[in-house]
Amino acid sequence: MSFDHDTVTGFAKSFGLFYLIAMSIGVIVYAYWPANRKQFDHAAHSIISDDEDRPCP
Amino acid sequence: MIQGTWIIQRGGVGMVALLTALERTYAAIILVFVICVGVAMAVAGRGDLMAAHGWIVALFGMVVMAVLLRGIDAPEPWEERFREYYDDPTKVGIILALIWGVIGMFVGVWVAALLAWPDLTFDAAWASFGRLRPVHTSGVIFGFGGNALIATSFHVLQRTTRARLPDQLSPWFVLIGYNLFCVLAATGYLMGLTQSKEYAEPEWYADLWLVIVWVVYFLIYIRTLARRREPHIYVANWYYMAFILVVAILHIVNNLAVPVSIGHAKSYSLFSGVQDAMTQWWYGHNAVAFFLTAGFLGMLYYYLPKRAGRPIYSYRMSIISFWGITFMYMWAGSHHLHYTALPHWVQTLGMVFSLVLLVPSWASAGNALLTLNGAWHKVRDDAVLRFMMLAAIFYGIATFEGSFMAIRAVNSLSHYTDWTVGHVHAGALGWVAMITFGSLYALVPWMWKRPALYSARLVELHFWLALAGTVVYVFAMWNSGITQGLMWRTYDQNGTLAYSFIDTLVAMHPYYIARTVGGLLFLAGAVVAFYNIWMTISRPAPVDEGAAADLPVEPPAPRAWAQAGE
Amino acid sequence: MFNFHYRLERNAMGLVLAIVVVASIGGLIEIAPLFTIDETVEDAPDMRVYTPLELAGRNIYIREGCYACHSQMIRTLRDEVERYGPYSLAVESKYDHPMLWGSKRTGPDIARLGGKYSNEWHVAHLYNPRDLVPESKMPAYRWLMRNSLKIGDLGEHLAAMRAVGVPYTDEMIANATADAYGQANPDSTQAAGVTARYGEATNVSLFDGKPETLTEMDAIVAYLQILGRLTDVAHKTEQASVE
Ligand code: HEM
Ligand code: HEM
């Protein structure tokens, strides 16, 4: 297999597209996966809870 | 009660006293090593500018050593320290950020004035435009922005993981080592040491040093995360992590170079021509993305909800925009090279990704603003929160503008002109500086355990100075950029170019004066901030009223968040 | 359920890896093909390397930050080609480590500056731009006239350039210092070596107007005069239509 310019750019363009689509789907599924909801809510609220400002022992 | 007094007692030398004897010893060893390296550089670089840098390194090491020695025989610190977060490096980082900010912006105003009145160079090489300009850019981006990022990242990291930093030496190594890098950068430019790579000007030895510092920074992050008590890693840390990791990759690749010799400061870049152009703008654009954007988004996602007392509007959206930004920015660098000798398909790719990039960018800006929705009364009353809101708005503006400028046809007009500079400062002043000032104003009273800032009215004054300065600056540059771009391409009836280059130069003059005025306003605001924060710190701490003094005092966290979010 | 992601986000190392992979693949895919570009880049058999004096001048150009105000990249746009000359080709900067395309035109593009003005014009202009162009925003670079040029180590510079891929010969490296002197002193014995090594067309002249002493002005003017003239491929090949 030869690595001439056209092959490499062709690969870059096609693979890049698949990669983009797969990546977007993956992220959206993860963000909206029902089971993740609870921990996201917890995380969002955790920083504003007024616990003591010190590390957990 | 006891801890309260204990905190107040340690100040000044106290920072060294809080280090364990072992940590002090290691610190001394590292400093001796740094001083030796400095002297070695001075010897190896005889007759070259590198010698000057060698002495600067050695001197820097000695100054830090002097501070260390003042507290070297303090008694072993009390075990109580493990019951608290380790905030000393954050405190020092805040002050360093402010100092660099004032210096960097002062030089910015000077550079702006040089374009209006070029004879302000006074026949001194170090004071000429080409040498001062990188002092400005590095001073504000790395000195001001970088120190603010390091300081806030240590704070956010500990609070969101509920774990203390893993040790007390490495954070100092990162903070002080990083500032050594900044000093080498700024002094180097003044002497004429530069690689000419935009935002990566420092020479090879400074670059190597930064790699070491950065690895330690990364390790602090990982070690703290490994000890976290919260199962979920809060999204702000994702952004800080992306900032640390990607900047490391960019920095190493972009700075690959062969020094003339071990005793020469000068090096020759490994890449040349079109490959170098793409590499430099892959770096340059992603320095914007991961230094000026991701890092500061980390700040936004922690300090804005915290200050507003409301959780982020949509946590999911913050995750989606995180991956969107991390993924897409990497492809967009070629929009800096439209119509150049770079192959056409790479330009198109850069343009397309720049357009799509608007989606995650606006998702972040919108998320921030929606978080404030329902708390507008706070925004009205609290200038600190208003800084953060304005930052989100300018982030939206700058990214919209950026995506627009990335369109080839638009770029043919904007490229090479002041429009780019206007875009840069819409982002830099409106977004980076505003979110930084907002976060630091929020952070300072927490760090120094003060009930509030020295003066809320000075914050208010700063807010209006900063807003006015930004608006004047950005509008002046939009006008001058678009005017110049249009003049360059205007033809007369005979089909020849209508304006000489000098004609366009004359047209720029008033805008350059306006920009200098806008910059002065912004600088004045930064000086006010420095004074206000300094007074907050130096005012005696309130008498300890029991354990409450250890808690973040403001803002009061209302329970209103229950209705916020999805 | 959905264990992979669940762990990813609990596992700090996973997050690190994900960031590195997601971020670097993009750059890799886009940049890697450029390193095969030599096959498609124009050929320029007449392309020569910078002489030691020109290289020293280029380093001064970098040191003074001239690139902050001047671009060296004429875009494929009609008005640029008419204002500055044939648009820049990739091959023309192939010996530029690093490239100096620039991103801001506070001053005009200078990719095709070589030969546009006399040496005297450049010296006077750099000494004080406002003597020649009253509206100029460019700093006065008087110290270039005062500073003598450091040429003793130019051989090492050439060797470093060779290490990054520029075809300097052993002879060029060995004679770098003499060549730098000779190029700025046409009457000296060293002058002949310069044309022998870098070609008859090499510009050998008293750049700063003063014989004997070699100043930084000599070097920067020598560099300015070679801009766009390392090869004339851009003038010879037919240029694609511009937009
Ligand atoms: C007091 C406020 C400031 C003033 C007066 C100012 C002024 C300037 C001037 C005159 C330039 C050179 C433009 C040119 O070459 O035509 C510049 C460039 C730049 N400044 Fe500022 N600046 C200020 C604040 C900042 C801040 C806070 C940041 C970043 C956080 C920043 C980032 C930059 C960058 C990245 C560039 C390079 C732009 C480019 O290459 O296109 N500036 N600034
Ligand atoms: C969606 C987001 C963004 C896009 C698509 C974008 C796009 C662009 C484009 C097209 C240019 C002009 C390149 C040229 O013609 O030379 C540019 C320059 C620049 N942008 Fe942005 N931008 C974005 C966000 C930002 C933000 C938030 C900042 C933060 C400060 C920023 C900082 C800069 C800087 C410093 C430059 C100047 C580079 C130089 O020439 O030295 N950008 N950007």
Image (cartoon, rainbow, N blue to C red):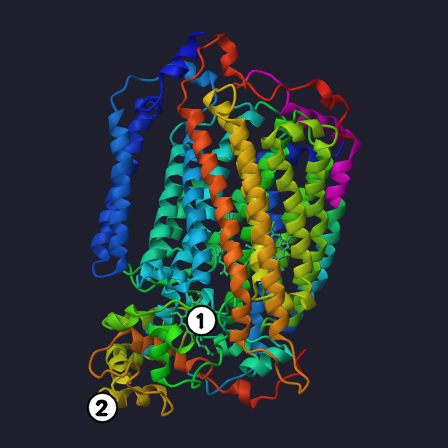
Q: Relative to A14, say whether C167 is above or below.
A: below
Give the residue drawn at x 44%, y 11%. B543
Q: Is residue B49 visible?
A: yes
Q: Count residues near mark 1 (Cα–Cα under 10 Å), then give few for <14, some for 14-19, many for 20+.
A: many
The C terminus of chain B, quarter of image:
top right
* In-front residue for pair C105/A46: C105
Checking the image for residue C187, the label placed there is: 2
In the image, B558 versus B204, the foreground residue is: B558
Q: Secondary structure at mark 2?
A: loop
Residue ID at (23%, 44%): B36
Instruction: Tell me the chief SS of the magenta region.
Output: helix
The chain letter for the residue carrying disc 2 is C
Assess disc 2: are there few (<14), some (14-19) or many (≥20) residues with their C-alpha within 10 Å of its C-alpha.
some
Q: Which callout, 2 or 1, points at the residue further toward the start of the chain?
A: 1
Tell me, for residue C136, which label it has, or none.
1
In the rendered image, which quarter is residue B461 located in? top right
Three-letter code, disc 2: Asp
Q: Which mark identifies residue B546?
A: none
- Magenta segment: A26-52
Chain under numbered label 1: C
Percent position of residue B439, x then y? 55, 33
